[in-house]
Amino acid sequence: MSRPQEPHRPFFHFGNPFRMISPKSSQLSPRLLSLLNAFEATLSERLLKLVPKDKDNILSLSWMKLAMESLSEIHCDIKKLITELELPVTGWDEKWIDVYLDISVKLLDISIAFTSELTRLNQGHLLLQCVLYKLESNSPEQFMQACSTLGSWRQHSGSKNPRVEACRPILDNLVESLNLPKVKNSAKGKVLMRAMYGAKVVTIYICSVYAAAFSGLANNLLDLSVPDTLPWAQVFSEVQTTLNAELRNIFSCGKFTVLRELDAIDACIKKLYPLLHDGLGTIEEESFKNSVSDLRMKAEKLSQGLDNLSKVVDGFFKIVLTGRDALLCNLRAGGDVPNSMLGRNVEGQVVR
């Protein structure tokens, strides 16, 4: 699934967009500065959780679950900050609203793509259940049918998902959106834009890791640069450098799949194939039983991991959707819905 590496593309080649949103401390009241510092300190803590203690855990379903949970927490932190800023919707600049709504609809589209891939992988798990039923039947005829089903599982698991492949253009567009509109005459607005900048950087990066993992393509992985003056810049750099180095190493190995649980199952299948084709003697019978038992254990681990990950991805979708809907409801009540976003919903559906 690996492909030749593309040269690393530095982002923000158009300059440092952060300089347009950096509030000078002297411009902020002690309360606003305290809110901003608290948000960015929490962001650093959430990022620290993503630094893997064991490199073998990278691209496991449990690590991906942790990463998505962190994104959900960060987006909840943004909601909390908006409330604490006491910045009414009527005080939002139309450009901010445009940016927020445009970003949210793209995140919803990406979440839908990830959900579709998890559903597809769960469908593959049904094939594994069928294989295990046949392998535990002690019937030579069923064994040969299991070989065919195993081939179907490998073909299914190795196939591409068009929805996931469509994520890269969306991510590139989100990277461009990091160049936020300039905030004038609003200290609260500057705090909000700076906080949203941090949330977007982490969201875009984690979503790129997901896109790379689900597509099996290293070129979906992003390299983001952030100003080193930010309190969370160092830990973000540590997370990104550690993950990207290991991820590109995994992709370079040319494995059947880069997801740890799927790769473990593929290793089991490779042990079973020769036993099924060559027949079982007294020596191979014990090895066969152990391999089948190992396959069942790893299949159950995969199923549990997919279920848990599906729940947190769905949770992230709901957090983004409820935040978007709340803003739209407030805008409709005040008659302030921007024309550019009127009627736009996820995947171009009409908002009613």
Image (tube, rainbow, N blue to C red):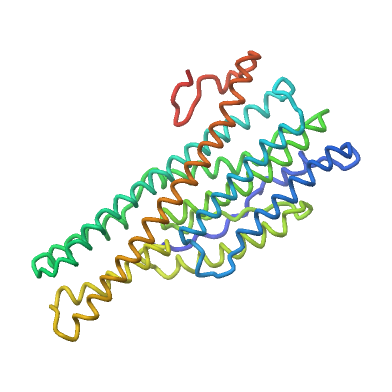
Q: Is residue 345 above or below residue 180?
A: above
Q: Is residue 129 above or below residue 68?
A: below
- Towards the viewer: 142 or 211: 142
Q: Position of residue 26 (x, y in %)?
A: 91, 40
Residue that appears at 56% across and 37% down: 319
Q: Residue reaching furthest bottom?
A: 283
Q: Quadrant of residue 325?
A: top right
Badge count: 0
* Left or right relative to 54: residue 309: left
Q: Position of residue 31 (x, y in %)?
A: 85, 38
Q: Residue reaching furthest right?
A: 26
Residue that appears at 72% across and 31% down: 83
Residue that appears at 55% across and 40% down: 173
- Towards the viewer: 323 or 94: 323
- Towards the viewer: 230 or 63: 63
Q: Residue reaching furthest left?
A: 141
* Left or right relative to 159: residue 63: right
Q: Position of residue 316 (x, y in %)?
A: 53, 42
* Left or right relative to 37: residue 80: left
- Towards the viewer: 61 or 208: 61
Q: Is residue 262 above or below residue 18?
A: below
The quadrant the N terminus occupies is bottom left
Residue that appears at 58% across and 51% down: 205
Q: Position of residue 154 (x, y in %)?
A: 27, 60
